[in-house]
Image (cartoon, grey):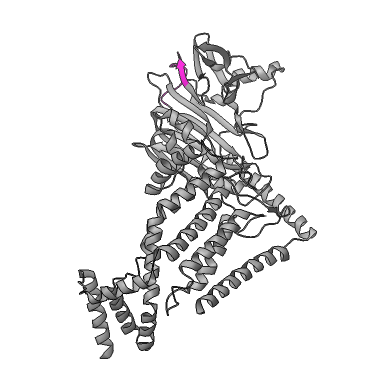
Amino acid sequence: MEEKKLDLNSIIGFVLIFAILVFMFWQNKPTPEEIEAEKAKQEQVEAQQKADENKVQENAVTEAAPINLQDSTAVANYKSNIGAFGFTSPSEETSILENDLVYLEISNKGGQIIEARMKQYHTYDSIPIYMVKDGNAHFGLNFSTSDNRVLNTKDLYFESSMSQNGENKVLSMKAKVSSNKYLEYRYEMKPNDYLVDFNVRSQGLSDVINSSQPIALEWKLKGIRHNKSITYENRYTRLTYNHEDDDIDKLSEGSDDEESETDIKWLSYRQHFFSSILANKDRFDSAELSSVNLVEEESRTFGFTKEYTSIIPLKAEGGELSENMHWYYGPTDVETFSKYEDLGLVDSIPFGWGIFGWINRYIFTPFYSFLSGIFPYGIAIVIMTILVRLAMSPVTYKSYLSQAKMKVLKPEITELGEKYKDNAMKKQQETMKLYGKAGVSPMSGCIPAFLQMPIFYALFMFFPTSFALRQKSFLWADDLSSFDTIYQFPEGFSIPFYGDHISLFPILASVAIFFYMMMTTGQNMPTQPGMPNMKFIMYLMPFMMLFFFNNYASGLSLYYFVSNLITIGIMLVIKNFILDNDKIHAQIQENKKKPKKENKFQKKMREMMEQAEAQKKK
């Protein structure tokens, strides 16, 4: 009867919490005046963000003002200012390199990529994915000349020529000082490939470039927003790099950061599901890296996430430059990156740390790819969840068996509590002695949960970073890699720590977690002095998960919802058809009769408790 009462109280408590949450949503619904005030505040925040961006840009190498090519005087001044490189006539022409996957537009000014567009992918609002567009990226070499000029190639004009190398398209951009002396950027694009070979070399410039002064490659990019939630996207937007024996490091994801590193193999400007990468098989000797966070809070209109800058010193051999590099503009995808095994680009994906990342990378990622090749993406998650829970069912059995043993011992523990209610030390000592005789460990229920932690964390990293889930729908969720939305709050209104929308999958997952916790902790773990109130935790945990998962990948919420339903089902089967409380009680009584051999730790603990008890009596 008491257990049924506890069940009813638990359910009523959860219903009350849910009702309070719904009431809070309704009560906090903004008035038109509040919406207008919040909108004005948002505009002020975005204005401040733009001011911060301008401040960052002021510290960068300034770009020369555009030249009016119709003005002969302006052209003459330009040629005079750049000295020997004035041999190349200014031209505003651009060249196109494209295949079935990616579109690149390269400008004669600077010889740099001014547009990089994905051909097979779109943003959440059906706009093509742009990695470079409208001046968000700059690339150039900063160097000194023998006549004491300081130049940057992004201010120079190049002469372009297109050719073929078998099936490959080759674009040569040359900043000339004469017909046979030049600085060349050479782009070579292969069919059906995101990786573009990029060579920088000079010919006959040993007497033009002052190689005794620093020569620096400067690459700057401001990440363009692609996702529905800019804060969610920004969480997985990060500068990652390979250095020193293929170690992988990252700059901070949530704040401004900078670092000086050596022996760089590649630099990845990751933009959640897409990456801009500069790689060098021969490695750069060193690099100065920085990342500036441009996102302060959620916004439906702000267009940029982070601003990255890399400054890389280059060496001139015999007064000439020669660097063989690669550009990559494409998806942050395991399957795509695996084609470039020699560069190790797959390591730029945030699988997670240590064993958690290993499980994610080598078990869950290929396993889900296999399932999604057979079933629809949402169904593949459900099937994967079922198989994972079945694989973990022995752990669930051990956990529930431990709880069943504790439940059988509960009357005796309660009796000890009454007997020694005025002597907490003695009560603890006798309780531990009872556990020892019965062959029960109070920690045995925690060990299975601990063993499941690597699985929990690996899946926690899998769903938000799995490219296979991007923009794949299931039921009411439009994108399993992002949150689902069943109600969008008015523009400018947001609940702190919750967000500007209501997601259904987190609600379902929280309800399932609540009933799971009610089965495992609600009735079998009484509150003890000095110990956490398990009833309170049982209510608080689902409530916290409801807030946390509201802005997380809906695929993860779907997994936890299905996972907890399956776990509840497995536990009901174990309880009703596998475990027999009478047999467990009989086994415990048998264990009590057997002499119990103490290990060194148990002996030491017993002696310490006996000494403490003796000291207390004195």
Residue 8 percent across, percent down from the top left: 57, 74
- Which residue is farthest top? 179
**Residue 159 lies in quadrant:** top right
**Residue plotted at (40% across, 19% down):** 319
- Which residue is farthest bottom? 618
Q: Up-down: is 383 above or below 100?
A: below
Q: Up-down: is 234 above or below 91?
A: below
Q: Main secondary structure of the magenta part?
A: loop
Q: Up-down: is 346 above or below 166?
A: below
Q: Does residue 351 appear anywhere in the picture?
A: yes
Residue 145 percent across, percent down from the top left: 49, 22
Q: Look at the image and give the residue range highlighted in magenta.
A: 199-212
Q: Nearer the viewer, residue 260 or 516?
A: 516
**Residue plotted at (52% across, 32% down):** 219
Q: Does residue 293 appear anywhere in the picture?
A: no
- Please tell me whether residue 304 belongs to the stretch shown in magenta: no
Q: Nearer the viewer, residue 416 or 237?
A: 416
**Residue plotted at (46% across, 67% down):** 520
Number of marks = 0
Residue 225 percent across, percent down from the top left: 62, 40
- Please tell me whether residue 203 belongs to the stretch shown in magenta: yes
Residue 538 percent across, percent down from the top left: 51, 68
Q: Quadrant of the C terminus?
A: bottom left
